[in-house]
Amino acid sequence: MATFLSRLGRLAFRRRGVTLLLWLLVFGGMGFAASSAPPPPADTFSMPGTESQEAFDLLGEKFPEASVDGASARVVVRAPEGAKITTPAQRTTVERLVAELGASSPQVVGVADPYKTPDVSISEDGTTAYMVVTYKVPATEVGDKAHDALDAATERARRAGLTVEAGGDAVKIEQAMGGTGEQIGILVSAIVLVLTFGSMIAAGMPLITALVGVGIGISGITALGSTLGLSGTTSTLAMMIGLAVGIDYALFIVSRFRAERAEGRTPEEAAGRAVGTAGSAVVFAGLTVIVALAGLAVVDIPMLTKMGLAAAGTVAVAVLVAITLVPALLGFAPVKVMARKGRLAYAVKPLSERKRRRAAKHAERLARKTKPNLGSRWASFVLRHPVAVLLAGVVGLGTVAVPAAGLELGLPGEGQMSTETTQRKAYDLLSESFGPGFNGPLMVTVQTDGAENAKAAGDEVGKALGNVSGVASVYPAAANKPGDTAILTVIPETGPTEKRTEELVRELRATAGDLERGTASRILVTGQTAMFIDFSQTLDDALLPYLGLVVGLAFLLLMVVFRSVLVPLKAALGFLLSVAAALGAVVAVFQWGWLADVFGIDAPGPIMSTMPIFMIGVVFGLAMDYEVFLVSRMRESYAHGARPAEAVVDGFRYGGRVVSAAAVIMISVFSGFIVEDNDFVKMIGFALAIAVLFDAFIVRMAIVPALFALLGKSAWWLPKWLDRILPRVDVEGEKLGPAQAVEPPADRDRIPVG
């Protein structure tokens, strides 16, 4: 592996013009394809094989007229204090609003007049009513003019004295994401890179290559979005992950290149060694991330599968950019700029054998006189106090993980939006006037074997379900035209996210099972809470296979890389500790409301059900990144003859600073997304940032060296029979030869390099 990548790095360095041109052509081509593609679809949620999804599919088949893909807006109106919405004056104002909404845009199909269905659309106290505006196009195709017309009509009704709010997918988000998260992450990353390299050019290179990789990945997602159903959220998450790993991967290769140049190697040789050593770590680190993200397909939830595969594709592009475009750009950079501060970079003529021996001895003297840096001093401290450091790290993360025991999952909705949005205000008005369960109705389908029997069966089922404790009301059954299927709506007494509603769904499904035998029909229960129950069951069924697949494949990869059984084992255990602590922090902030004002959380509540497993997949891949980057330098030193303790110190001396900078960059990129308004993106950004903080600085920087100190040579133990069958990939660059320093030649042998 190291030899192949070294040759690839040299080739990219020599043919830097061609390499750069090829990447620019790919970048431009993908950008053109993205600009020509139709808008991405809205986020959809489906769960094949569940009762809820079966009911929705049945509705689409039996009630095609009710299964249009058009958007809708639910406009809620409330009379002034002390007045009724049914008085002539208020009715005139509401009917004028209905007429204006109907004529507001050519995209509007119709508006349901609340006075034609007062039992359904007007509250019992007569103060509040709602109307549904139906559009003939999906939410993503509702134009700005239609949005503005809806806003203008509701504003005129407000000026007339009514309280008017609107919810639904046809209502525009008041503060849509505008790239703030990426800008913050890039700014902080640039500062960290400048401090790390002490050079604007060296610092800018990882940023430029990461942006190229992310641009290609996001353009590809956008170009295929309409065809493959990849939503805007999918692009945002892929950008978040691709930007973070892209900067980190380029950082490691540029840093290794500078180290090789500081040892006196020619630029081409330094580029080859950098890609052969650090590039090998990048490839395997990227593979672990790709495996973790692509493994989300095991869960069999299309939305998670699309997110995982899109992000995995972006990571793959980041890896290719790091091992080809980065060495090409190194060839364009001024040589002195790319040398480490305080070291002279120069090219060397071929030396005689006598001079080579003298250079080797000089390198040994330099190695013995190398001053310890912060990384080596920290490693030495951990090696002296391994038990104390290990206990402090494990107990600390275990304490932070305690809130994870109270994790409550829920589906996103308008009830979790900011209280300043019109969607949340409409949601609250409906809950106050029509009951908490009105925002989370349950739908029941009744399918019979014979025609024209569904209406009678539906009425019988509705009567029985109405007697179940926790049911506020049941709307009359409505049959389709053939008469073989009926639907009825059940309104719970409690809200969609409450525990009692979840228990009600289970009771309704149990009652439906008994009713099926008496009515000779097939009865299915669906709705928001029902979907949450089915989703939880789907996750429960898929979590262990997913963890087994991802951890198993990553374990094999790390065992091949490090030629050890215990190194990948402790890497996996450290990941579990990190993810548990991250989940605990997410629960404390987003569910319990700790520091809610700091993070801009208006309504603490249940954690979005898709977040934990997505976070597990991403964090596992990123955790293995730091394991590979840090331990590969230890392995490289150990493979070249260092003792176990010396290998740990060498790993931190040469890799600690870079890994720390990479972790700070990744944390800053993820933290930037906390300011976004999309709740799922905000939560994912926080979870990934805190997980990287825990994993990089506590697990990898403290627990890992402590375990190495306690294990000694046993850390690199591998059974002989396993050693014979495992492929040798030479990630540490052993076949490239030891990275010895070269003695500065005499003036007559020195070639000026700019």
Image: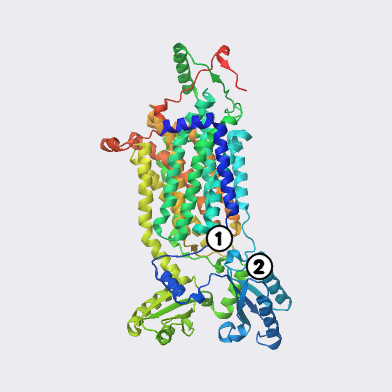
Residue 499 in view (yes/no): no
Query: Of callouts 2 and 1, which one flags the residue occurring earlier in the amino acid sequence?
Result: 2
Foreground mark, 2 or 1, reads 2
- Answer left or right for 261 relative to 640: right
Residue at left offset 51%, top offset 23%: 265
Q: Nearer the viewer, residue 736 or 721?
A: 736
**Tag 1, which secondary structure?**
helix
Q: Quadrant of the C terminus?
A: top right
Kindly indicate the quadrant of the structure image that contains residue 716.
top left
Residue 334 against residue 673 in the figure, above or below = above
Residue 47 against residue 277 in the figure, above or below = below
Q: Residue furthest left?
A: 721
Q: Which mark is residue 602?
A: none
Q: Nearer the viewer, residue 244 or 125?
A: 244
Residue at left offset 63%, top offset 67%: 421
- From the image, tell me which residue sits under label 2: 147
From the top left corner, tell me how far across and down residue 36 is, in percent.
Answer: 59, 54
- From the image, tell me which residue sits under label 1: 679
Indicate how the structure is coloured in the image. rainbow
- Answer left or right for 537 relative to 427: left
Residue 536 against residue 13 in the figure, above or below = below
Residue at left offset 43%, top offset 25%: 738
Estimate the spatial distance between the alpha carbons at disc 2 and disc 1, rounded to whole Å. Answer: 22 Å
Q: Residues within 10 Å of mark 1 (few under 14, many from 20)?
A: many
Residue 69 against residue 334 in the figure, above or below = below
From the top left corner, tell me how far across and down residue 455 is, in percent.
Answer: 43, 86
Residue 548 in view (yes/no): yes
From the top left corner, tell me how far across and down residue 259 is, in percent.
Answer: 52, 29
Q: Nearer the viewer, residue 342 or 245?
A: 245
Q: State yes or no: discs 2 and 1 in contact (Cβ < 8 Å).
A: no
Q: Amino acid at mark 2?
A: His
